[in-house]
Amino acid sequence: MRGTRVFRRYHRQVAVIMCLPLTLTIITGTAYPILDGWLSLHKVSGFILKIHSGSVFGLDAIYPIFNGLGLMGLLITGLSMTSLFSKKGAIAEVPVGQLELEKKRMKN
């Protein structure tokens, strides 16, 4: 139980940090083919590509690595919070009192 709390805390922290870079990557990655291929706005699409790669901010060497590591961190912490890798299986534990209440509700 304690390990799940720690992973939840890390997952929340990484998600807050990665929110803006991933949002920029998603929006610019979607906008680039539309602006370049469909609308033929080459100057605008060039600027969008610079934002997408991080070169506008001077981070073109580290920005993709930062995005990749952040996504891997979110994936690892997110998967660890699921019951996919637990020895008990994917069945959630239900407190005994709650189970009895559910049985009574089903009878009524």
Image (cartoon, rainbow, N blue to C red):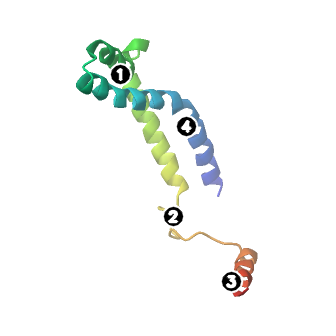
Mark 1: which amino acid?
Ser
Which of discs 1 and 3 lies nearer the camera? The answer is: 3
Determine which quarter of the picture holds residue 17: top right
Mark 4: which amino acid?
Ala
Q: Earlier in the sequence, mark 1 or mark 2?
A: 1
Q: Earlier in the sequence, mark 4 or mark 3?
A: 4
C-alpha separation, residue under disc 3 versus residue under disc 2: 30 Å
Mark 4 and mark 3 in contact? Answer it, CB < 8 Å: no
Q: Which mark is residue 15?
A: 4
C-alpha separation, residue under disc 1 versus residue under disc 3: 56 Å
Q: Earlier in the sequence, mark 1 or mark 3?
A: 1
In terms of secondary structure, where does tag 2 sit? Answer: loop
Which of discs 4 and 3 lies nearer the camera? The answer is: 3
Mark 3: which amino acid?
Met
Residue at 51% across / 53% down in the picture?
A: 80
Determine which quarter of the picture holds residue 72: top left
- Where is residue 25 drawn, in percent x and y? 41, 29
Mark 4 burial class by Cα count in 10 Å: few <14, some 14-19, many 20+: some
In terms of secondary structure, where does tag 3 sit? Answer: helix
C-alpha separation, residue under disc 2 versus residue under disc 4: 24 Å
Q: Which mark is residue 53?
A: 1
Q: Earlier in the sequence, mark 3 or mark 2?
A: 2
Q: Earlier in the sequence, mark 2 or mark 4?
A: 4
Front-most of residues 76 and 98:
98
Q: Which residue is mark 3?
A: 106
Mark 1 and mark 3 in contact? Answer it, CB < 8 Å: no
Residue at 30% across / 28% down in the picture?
A: 34
- Where is residue 40 drawn, in percent x and y? 24, 19
Q: Which residue is mark 2?
A: 86
C-alpha separation, residue under disc 4 versus residue under disc 1: 20 Å
